[in-house]
Amino acid sequence: MGAFEDCLEDHFDVVGELYRNDPSLELIPMLFAVTVEGKVLSVSFPSSAWNEQRYEMLAEAASELATHKLLVVFLVSEAWMSQYQADEVLEEIPRPSQDPERKEIAMVVGMGVGGRTGCIQATIDRSDGSLKDVCRFPEDGGVFQSDLLEHFMASYIGAYVARLEAN
């Protein structure tokens, strides 16, 4: 594994440790940013407003973090996930919030300033705080996209360049 993948694994390990320490933990959306100097910065977002205001909150965080030269950012959150068969019609599949067979997952999505992306997700077992069925994306050189991190990174680069031009 390369440095990006190692950093993604390290942040996923931290999330796993949090759940093992407190199985009832509700992981609010958090952003971790690693600077070129290796310093880890974090921003927490209020989960009550996340669904409606996540893009605005990410743009605000990007502006605040533009005083630092970032190497990689990670978005950590919980989500509901539905599973379906490949032959099912997407429009007929219930949204995860409406699916009685949904799974609760913990997810760490990472993006390097150069555009490299990756994701690790796992099912949360609330009985003991363990993370099961760990999946890593992309597999075999595939591509993983995160609209949220792409939005953050575009906002960050714009704010960072504006600060450089202002000096």
Image (cartoon, rainbow, N blue to C red):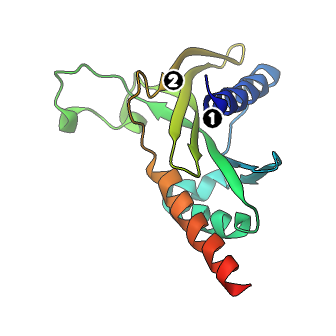
* For the residues bearing labels 1 and 2, Cβ distance under 8 angstroms: no
Q: Residue at 61% x, 54% y: name it.
A: 48
Q: Residue at x 66, y 70 (%)?
A: 63
Residue 77 point in image, percent of width and height = 61, 40
Q: Which residue is mark 1?
A: 4
Residue type at numbered disc 2: Arg
**Labels 1 and 2: the sequence-earlier one:** 1
Q: How many marks?
A: 2
- Foreground disc of the pair 1, 2: 1
Q: Dot 1: few (<14), some (14–19), or many (≥20) neighbours within 10 Å? A: some
12 versus 146 height, above or below? above
Q: Quadrant of residue 129?
A: top right
Q: Which residue is mark 2?
A: 136
Left or right relative to 63: residue 35:
right
Q: Is residue 90 visible?
A: yes
Q: Quadrant of the C terminus?
A: bottom right
Q: Which mark is residue 139?
A: none
Q: Secondary structure at mark 1?
A: helix
Q: Quadrant of the N terminus?
A: top right
Decide if residue 29 is in sight here: no
- Residue 52 in percent (x, y) is at 50, 60
Q: Amino acid at mark 1?
A: Phe
Measured from the top left, where is residue 44 in percent x and y?
72, 52
- Relative to 32, does residue 45 appear above or below in the rendering? below
